[in-house]
Amino acid sequence: MKPSARAGLSRQKVLTTALELTDRDGIEKLSMRRLGAELGVEAMTLYHYLPNKAALLDGLVELVVSAVRPDLDGAAAHWPKALRGFATALRAELLRHPGVIPLVATRPAQSPDALRVVEATAAALGRAGIPPLEALRIINSVSTFVIGHCLAEAATTPGHPEDTPAPDLSPYPVLTAALRAGLGTPADHQARFTLALDALLLGLAAAHPG
């Protein structure tokens, strides 16, 4: 019996454990050696399931993106609502795994499971008469906005200092007032996300009135 079989490993288990490790310690600390130790095997055993570190990182993107479950029901004319469901679901999933956000921002989702999410969303736009190329451009625009917002919201990119001293805002009364009103709080992040998403969807709907 192979050591990997004795360990009860599979590609899914390796990726799931890598995601747990990333959630706990950050993406910058993820390595094949540490992942192997977490699973109780030598690092070389992992190469039975993933050929290299790049495949491991791509697999993390696959796990997170394929877990997005947007609400795509509704009439064709209501495609902005479907797009809102996609954006909201993507943001929620990214914020569940902030360490993976930089990967999602820089590595395209190419697995069948991840592509099914994009395909279903594009199909919802297609039912409203939006051609495939334009539908994918719209999805890309919304995805880029969501990923960028989540990067700023989570602020957990590699090398980001955990304890950054607060700047002196006394010379900046507007910023001081905003901070006192809740700037940077979860409610503020939600409000900013909603404001920007509303504006983006309004513009996209105006460009594609149907």
Image (tube, grey):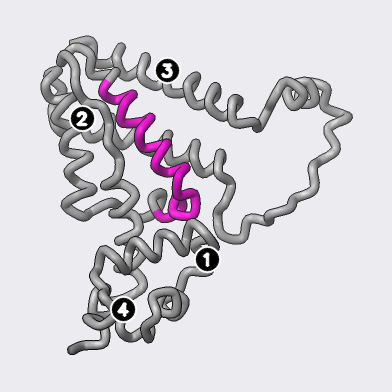
Which badge, 1 or 3, is on the more N-terminal residue? 1
Instruction: Identify which residue is drawn at 83% across, 22% down.
Output: 173
Q: Which residues are magenta?
A: 82-103
What is the spatial separation of the Cα atoms under label 4 and label 2, in whole angstroms?
A: 38 Å
Residue wearing tag 2: 135
Closer to viewer: mark 3 or mark 2: 3
Q: Does dot 3 land on a helix, a strand or a loop?
A: helix
The residue carrying pointer 1 sits among few (fewer than 14), some (14 to 19) or many (20 or more) residues within 10 Å by Cα, namely: few
Residue wearing tag 3: 198
Closer to viewer: mark 1 or mark 4: 4
Q: Amino acid at mark 3?
A: Asp
Q: Amino acid at mark 2?
A: Ala
Closer to viewer: mark 1 or mark 2: 1
Instruction: Identify which residue is drawn at 49% across, 40% down.
Output: 150
Residue wearing tag 4: 46
What is the spatial separation of the Cα atoms under label 3 and label 2, in whole angstroms?
A: 18 Å
Give the quadrant of residue 5: bottom left
In this picture, is 13 found above or below 43?
A: above
Give the quadrant of residue 202: top left
In this picture, is 55 found above or below 105?
A: below
What is the spatial separation of the Cα atoms under label 1 and label 2, in whole angstroms?
A: 34 Å
Q: Amino acid at mark 1?
A: Glu
In this picture, is 57 found above or below 144?
A: below
Q: Does dot 4 land on a helix, a strand or a loop?
A: helix
Query: Considering the image in quadrants, where does the C terminus appear?
Result: top left
Asked if the residues shown at circle 1 and circle 2 are in contact, with their CB atoms under 8 angstroms apart, the answer is no
Residue 108 is covered by the magenta coloring: no
Closer to viewer: mark 4 or mark 2: 4
Residue wearing tag 1: 28
Which badge, 4 or 3, is on the more N-terminal residue? 4
